[in-house]
Amino acid sequence: MSMQISSVQITPSANFALRQFWAAIFAKAIQYNRQARGLSVQDAAQLAGMEVSEWAAIEAGAVPRTEGELYAIAGTLEIGYDRLFNLVLLCRDAWEM
């Protein structure tokens, strides 16, 4: 018996949906860790040196674009950069890499 495996083509709309899915997973993890620390969005943004709108956007599914933002988030959430970076790797499809 022979088996043929065809390559899967991901359409632009499917790719966008995949990015949204993983961005939502990342956002929920950030929100969960913020709430576990008892921080408001305003408090977290201030501790991270961000605008409230920037932090809120991350929790709404926007992904951080710089390593500095990731370090600030990790520090604010007291989770360590390595742990946050593992989350980034898990959710890597949220970024256009």
Image (cartoon, grey):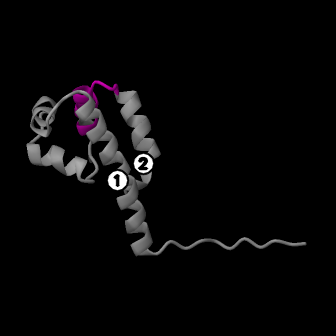
Q: Where is residue 61 in the image (x, y as percent from the top left)?
A: 27, 54
Relative image position of residue 62 (x, y in whole percent):
25, 53
Q: For this view, does 48 lie left or right of residue 31?
A: left
Say if 78 sits above or below 16 in the image: above
Q: In this view, does 64 lie above or below 85?
A: below
Question: Start and end of the magenta stretch?
Answer: 69-80
Whole-percent x, y for residue 87 in the image: 41, 39
Give yes or no for residue 22 being in the magenta stretch: no
Predominant SS along the magenta part: helix
CA separation, marks 2 and 1?
Answer: 7 Å
The residue located at (43%, 67%) in the rendering is 15
Which mark is first along the chain, 1 or 2? 1
Taking the spot 11% from the left edge, 32% from the top edge, the residue there is 43
Give the quarter of the image for residue 74: top left
Q: Residue 91 carries which label?
A: 2
Above-or-below relation of 8 to 29: below
Amino acid type at image mark 1: Ala
Element marked by disc 1: helix
* Residue found at x 90% / y 72%: 1
Residue 11 is situated, as x and y percent measured from the top left of the image, at 46, 75
Q: Dot 2: what SS?
A: loop
Tags 2 and 1 in contact by the CB under 8 Å rule?
yes
Task: Identify residue for label 1.
Answer: 23
* Mark number displayed over residue 69: none
- Name of the residue lying farthest toward the right: 1
**Residue 97 visible to an observer of this rendering:** no
Residue drawn at (22%, 28%) of the image: 76
